[in-house]
Image (cartoon, rainbow, N blue to C red):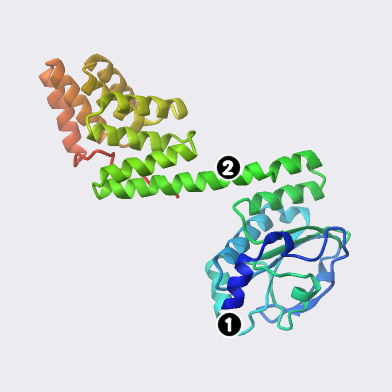
Amino acid sequence: MISIMLFSFFHPASAIDISPGTTAPGFSLQSIDGQAVSLHQYKDSIVILIYWWPDQSRSLLALKDGQDILLQFKDRSVWVIGLTADTDHTDTIKRILKNNNIDFPVLLDSERQVFGDYGLHVYPSTVVIDKRGQVAYTLAGHALTYKKALEGHLQYILGEIDEKTMHQMISPRNEYTAESLLIAHSEYNLALTFTEAQLFDLAVDAVKRSIKVRTDIAEPHVLLGFLYLEENESDKAFGEFTEALKLNPDSNDAKTGLGEALILKGDIDKAVEILNEALRTNPHPQMTYYELGRAYELKGDLSKALEMYKRAIEKIIDKKILPSHLSRFK
């Protein structure tokens, strides 16, 4: 287990010894299904080797990405081979492959021949071999941009894009973008959890952190807007819903929240206008009906108010500060 932990934190710069341009060492190993598989079988094809460890989550992510790559590029003579040195848990490996729909061969490197010949030090390690049998690209670990990096190099090897385009695809900025998106989603989900627990101060702090990391996502602005409404801060709520609609003009949640903010600000006619707009395309209109009922009641149009309240009740709304369907990022 200690060795696996060391592999997990090994510095990527020295994680794979074999260099691009080197002839890929051959091998012939038995697959998990008992079939003999050799690198020579894939002559004149592009081969992606993924060396992994069964109980490591990043290794499993690499296998899943490898499966996606296989489906995407298979008609262009691109193949994927998995390898592992863990020969003591073959039943576990078979279960992992079945549960994750991995259908490329996984070979048992019981003597660590490939591991040593390719100079690997970290799980997972990925080596791309071109049609000439030379190492074209190596990738240690599993970063958020793992699949995008493989796609870029494969397209370059296949002659589908030039070198400049490839480097744009795999640039560090792309990795930063992916990481920032992950952090923003995590903070947003945390804010939703705090909101559901009615820990509104903590929710506000978390969603503000989400927005600070990524200002270009509408949902955190919507959530913050509803949190401000809970505090009767109509101006701040109005600003957040307005920003959300700039990012996503079709957000019915933002339109509903904006209508509620307008009611608090006393602009009832504008509230009715925006809430009716939200109704036209809203698949979950319960909250919008409720807010329209409030708006018409404040206008003195009691018949329309009752109609809106009735429709809200028919939708079985339990009035909360958030629309019941507002979902987490996946």
Residue 148 position in % (x across, y down): 66, 49
| Residue 326 in sight | no
Q: Earlier in the sequence, mark 1 or mark 2?
A: 1
Where does label 2 land, which residue? 177
| Side (left or right) of 144 relative to 321 | right
Task: Give the percent coordinates (x, y) of residue 103.
Answer: 63, 67
Q: How many marks?
A: 2
Circle 1: is it few (<14), some (14-19), or many (20+) Cα within 10 Å? few
User: Is 170 placed left or right of 298 in the picture?
Assistant: right
Q: Is residue 202 above or below residue 19?
A: above
Whole-percent x and y of residue 221? 39, 34
For image coordinates 57% across by 46% down, the residue present is 178
Residue at 28% across, 42% down: 201
Image quarter of residue 300: top left
Q: Residue at x 38, y 41 (%)?
A: 207
Q: Quadrant of residue 13?
A: bottom right
SS under mark 2: helix
